[in-house]
Image (cartoon, rainbow, N blue to C red):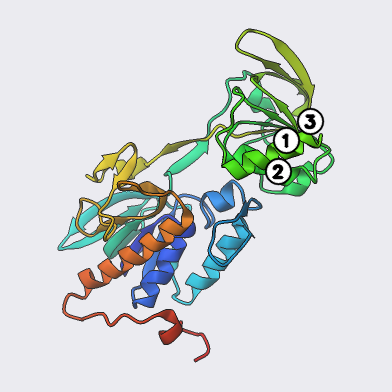
Amino acid sequence: MTHTKTDVAIIGAGPVGLFAVFECGMLGLKSHVFDALEEIGGQCTALYPEKPIYDIPGLPEIAAGGLIENLEKQAAAFNPVYHLGSPVEGLQEKDGRFILKTARGNTVDAGAVIIAAGAGAFGPNRPPIENIKDFEGTSVFYACRNKSQFKDCDVAIAGGGDSALDWAIALQPIAKSITIIHRRDKFRGAPDSVSKLQDLREKGLVKIETPYQLKDIRGSEGRIDHIDLADMDGNQKQIKADALLCFFGLSTSLGAISHWELELSKKELAVNPETCQTNRDGVYAIGDVATYPKKLKLILTGFAEAAQAAHDIYHRLNPDTPLHFEYSTTKGVPGSPA
């Protein structure tokens, strides 16, 4: 067990948490970063490292895992201390500072706290199929970590949101066949993704089974042979598949965070959009875990919130030292060429 002191404790090592390290570092603030997962990156690493992301400014396309690698390099200049596989279980306030205790018994004394926990601790929402666990990890998956494993496979994708559509489009050139299964005729994904999917369907490159739901999985020794489908009227059909990707969202929980006397709004933390501070002085929230009127849940929004929080924390920790703001193009980054 250890007890250390730092300027900022950042809870969550996803993309927004990593960028918060950089923004704090540019203001001379040291950071300790905590995450329940054993590696950095949050959902980008744990669920879809190969999924392409298109809305990062200056990067027309980048894989989620590649984005995390770049953010880790960007943060490295400020020597953050990572506490991975070590969720924060306790938060106490003492003399205007915060004492964080991890599940491993370590404590960190921080001047401010940034919660960048995304949706919180997460796990997949499983479809109600009795024998589905018999196939998990071998032919049933809730995330795609390696596209090549589906090469020449008959892949069924269940769901109608962005993840289902994005992976249908991404895996189509690799898989032997792609079949989308959705309980409604309309999809919830981005209009551009829906348009691309319909184009692939018209070209005979993707099959769409609607309005159907998963009814049963058939196979042996963890390997799928066929999937039984049924509609709301009881009509049934069977499709051939040897891999099934299920995208029904995540079951999430804020865990210990929900007991820290923070104002909640539908499992999200209400913040002042000018500073990203919660109702608790010195505790901030950024990224998907933070909410305020008309917020857009985009990674780039979280990046901007990281900068806002960092600047407010600087004034909190250095009330008598004015901040002479400089752009990175002027001041540079530690370790970079002058």
At horizontal 46% and vertical 59% (from top left) the residue drawn is 300
Q: Specify the amino acid type for callout 2.
A: Ile
The Cα–Cα distance between marks 3 and 2, rounded to whole angstroms, is 18 Å
Give residue 138's position: percent from left, percent from top: 73, 35
Give the residue pinned by disc 1.
138
Give residue 325's position: percent from left, percent from top: 31, 80
Q: Residues within 10 Å of mark 2 (few under 14, many from 20)?
A: some
Classify mark 3: helix, strand or loop: loop
> Do the residues under discs 3 and 2 have CB atoms within 8 angstroms?
no
> Do the residues under discs 3 and 1 have CB atoms within 8 angstroms?
no
Q: Specify the amino acid type for callout 1.
A: Thr
Mark positioned earlier in the residue sequence (3 or 2)? 2
Q: Specify the amino acid type for callout 3.
A: Asp
Residue 257, quarter of the rendered image: top left
Give the residue pinned by disc 2.
169
> Do the residues under discs 2 and 1 have CB atoms within 8 angstroms?
no
At horizontal 53% and vertical 64% (from top left) the residue drawn is 57
Camera sees residue 16: yes
Is 225 drawn above or below residue 191 in the view shown? above
Give the residue pinned by disc 3.
242
